[in-house]
Image: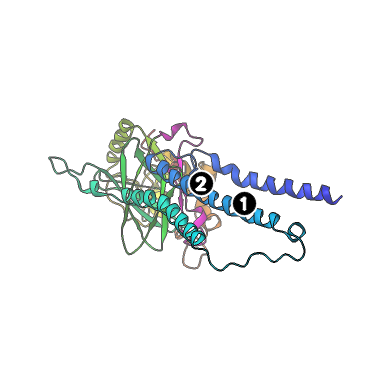
Amino acid sequence: MMKGLKKWRLFSLLAVMMVFLSGCGEDYLSTLKPSGEVGKQQLNLLLLTTVIMTLVVVVVSVIYLLAFVKYRRSRVGENVIPKQVEGSHTLEVIWTVIPIILLLIIAVPVVTTTYKFADVAAMDEVDEEGNKTALTINVTAKLYWWEFEYPNQGIVTAQELVVPTGEKVYFNLKAADVKHSFWIPAVGGKMDTNVENLNKFYLVFDKESKDLKDGVFYGKCAELCGPSHALMDFKVKTLSPDAFDAWVDAMKATEGQTADKASTDLGEATFANSCLGCHAISGSGAGGTPGPNLTTFGDRNRVAGFLEHNEESLKAWIKNPEEFKPGNLMMNAEGTAPIYGNLSDEEIEALATYIMGLSVEK
Ligand code: CUA
């Protein structure tokens, strides 16, 4: 009976571990399946340190168990007093030198790689015409969303980062309110976004994201920042260099795009009245709007960063954003209603259709 119970316990433990670990092998999310130079080298460091640490644990455990078994009383006899020693130069040298060697084996590659990843000198390089040559993206983390500004292209987007494959993409990272942390697990990172200083690093994206499960890599906020920290996701679309250039041109072409309060389209008129104050729908220009830029909303993968991308989710979100992302800034100060008031079902319906139609890819 007891034996059966023990087996069952072990089985449930393994089953729970399976559930936890099943997320580890996904190529859109997993640090263990990196899709870029930075992620690959970070994984190598992880493996190196894990191997060395495992080796230490195994060797120490074996010596411990050997002493345990070999010198137990029933084996050496009741009245044996072992040889009394005080200090051993040989042993002390051995157990000082071995850890020093192991630490050096870990420290040398870790420190050199860390400095290499922090090398952002190329951000300032310019061509003959004085244009910056490296692709730089200004990331601003806000409660609870992400803004991505491309200063050299003069465009801005939010929630879904679009990057080309095969080149170093440089990031200026900052936060607008509290500390967050920018992390694309399958590509590299993470790095804090702070309010008081700019952090810089680069990532390389090897693989086009269109073949992944959802067509995007997953990005995360990795610093506890408030009640909706766990929902502060973003997505990363990686395109071939040509497709990326086409996307940039399409974004630039939205210059001046806006919504008209007098429009006969109820969705557009509602947007102009209730949303345009915080959300821009032109991807041309700089960031800094109170809410996420919505120019590419129809091209995105999620509503609010994590809800299914369809009109049903969008309508539910507009109706009561607090229910889905507690602490988001779409609610009034009392938290009783959205700052745009309670819209009618008809208005919400039209608004959802209008916002879903915002696209530069279709
Ligand atoms: Cu932002 Cu956690």
* Residue 322, placed above or below residue 8: below
x%, y% of residue 247? 32, 36
Identity, as a three-letter code, of the amino acid under mark 2: Val
The local crowd at label 1, few if under 14, some if 14 to 19, many if 20 or more residues have their Cα within 10 Å, is few
The local crowd at label 2, few if under 14, some if 14 to 19, many if 20 or more residues have their Cα within 10 Å, is few
x%, y% of residue 92? 49, 62
Kindly identify which residue carries mark 1. 62
Q: Is residue 357 magenta?
A: no
Which disc number belongs to residue 279? none
Q: Which residues are magenta?
A: 207-236
* Comes first in the chain, label 1 or label 2: 2
Under circle 2, the secondary element is: helix
1 sits left or right of 326 in the view: right
Q: Is residue 231 magenta?
A: yes
Query: Which residue is rendered at x = 50% and y = 49% of the image?
Result: 52
Front-lying residue, 5 or 233: 5
**CB at disc 1 and ligand 1 closer than 8 Å:** no
Foreground: disc 1 or disc 2: 1
x%, y% of residue 333? 46, 67
**CB at disc 2 and ligand 1 closer than 8 Å:** no
x%, y% of residue 237? 40, 39
Q: How many marks?
A: 2
- Quadrant the C terminus occupies: top left
Front-lying residue, 109 or 137: 109
Query: Which residue is rendered at x = 25% and y = 45% of the image?
Result: 154
Which disc number belongs to residue 51? 2
Q: CA distance from mark 1 to mark 2?
A: 16 Å
Identity, as a three-letter code, of the amino acid under mark 1: Val
345 sits left or right of 81 in the view: left
Front-lying residue, 245 or 208: 208
